[in-house]
Image (cartoon, rainbow, N blue to C red):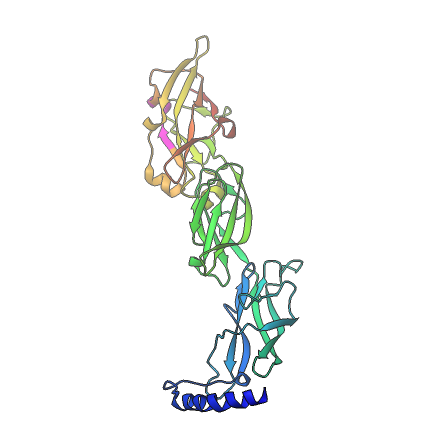
Amino acid sequence: MRLRLYFMTAIYLPILLYAMSTYQLESGAVVIDRDDLRPVAIPESRILFTGDDFIADILYQPVSDGLNGLRINTIANPGVEIIEGPEGLVYDKELRRFTFDTSQLFEGEPAEVREKEVRFLANVFIESIVENRVESRPVERSFTVRRPVVNVLSNTPQRLISNAQNDLSFLVEGLSESEIQLRESSVGLTISGSRISWSPAGNETTISVFRIAESGEPRLIDTRRFEVVPPPPPRVFIRRHQTEELLGPQNLVNINDDQIEIVIQPDPSFLQDYPNDARYEMGDLRLSFYQQGRPPQTITLRAADLPQDAARNRATRQVIYGPFRLSQLAGDLRGSEVRFEIQALNRINYRGLTEPVPTNQFQDFFSLNTR
């Protein structure tokens, strides 16, 4: 065996020495020994939001001067032992990377805790095949996980109004407009961005706020529930023209001389929050004149035929029909009492669509004494 070894060495050693003497490295090539490499965990991102997966690949960094910025991916597949770190941090040996699901990181934490720094320490075992030796080298990394806080801006933050223009904005600190997606449940609306302007259906709705990850995958941040209620009804009354005197059975109105008007006054809060939805129009109007000893005389009028002053309506933010005299409506009618009955009242929403206001929600009947 020894003679054979001497013989093989004598034959192949000159050939090996000749091959080494003729081998040339490319210009700029760097020869790095195992001892010159230090393992490092390079994360895809060091700042994440709850629900993101932390991923860090193991690469190798030369310790030689002038090569500190270099990262090397070798064919070596080292063994890894996690020494310190959060529960759920694992090392995937096939992919050679650390992974950690951050979705439960803030579970049980107070709401004011909005950010956490996560740190882990691991040993990387590098094996030398030539020397048949295993060395352990530490890898330490930290990253930050933020809990997204959703702030809602709304024209009515406590409730939403059906068949009206509701406007909500969902602002998330640290996220841009393009990184937010909203999904509304009642009408199945999906919005790319932080603002939604729409009319919900039903009695309630939920809006889910998603963050669009770098991969394009939407990840749920928060879900908000809102009650949906009908719009508050307006106030309807009759008054003398250019006065604030409301007319009722106790008042006496001259059929030929007194000017009166019918006023539809929107709910003040509804008008303030939904100016494009607090518009109204009256339908037909039935008038009945009563004279002692005679049957009542009844006529039906179209509200659109009554006089209106558009400029005054805009200035007062009311819908005013009038002024008019009773004799203008029916000159040959006489009596000691006149009764007004509003047949229909419609609300016009921001899209120009009409919605009837239930008659039990406003005063639709008036009685005046006349002479």
Q: Residue at x 33, y 23 (%)?
A: 328
Look at the image and say whether residue 322 sits in the magenta stretch.
yes
Q: Is residue 256 visible?
A: no
Q: Nearer the viewer, residue 296 or 361?
A: 361
> Given the current orientation, which residue lies at the most extreme top position?
293
Residue 295: horizontal and vertical position, in percent? 44, 9
Please state, as top left, top right, bottom left or bottom right, where the C terminus lies in the image: top left
Q: Residue at x 59, y 61 (%)?
A: 102
Residue 218: horizontal and vertical position, in percent? 48, 54
Q: 248 above or below 297?
A: below
Bounds of the magenta segment: 321-328
Please state, as top left, top right, bottom left or bottom right, where the N terminus lies in the image: bottom right
Q: Nearer the viewer, residue 230 or 211?
A: 211
Q: Is residue 304 visible?
A: yes
Q: Nearer the viewer, residue 303 or 160?
A: 160
Residue 160: horizontal and vertical position, in percent? 51, 43
The quadrant in which residue 329 appears is top left
Q: Nearer the viewer, residue 181 or 315?
A: 181
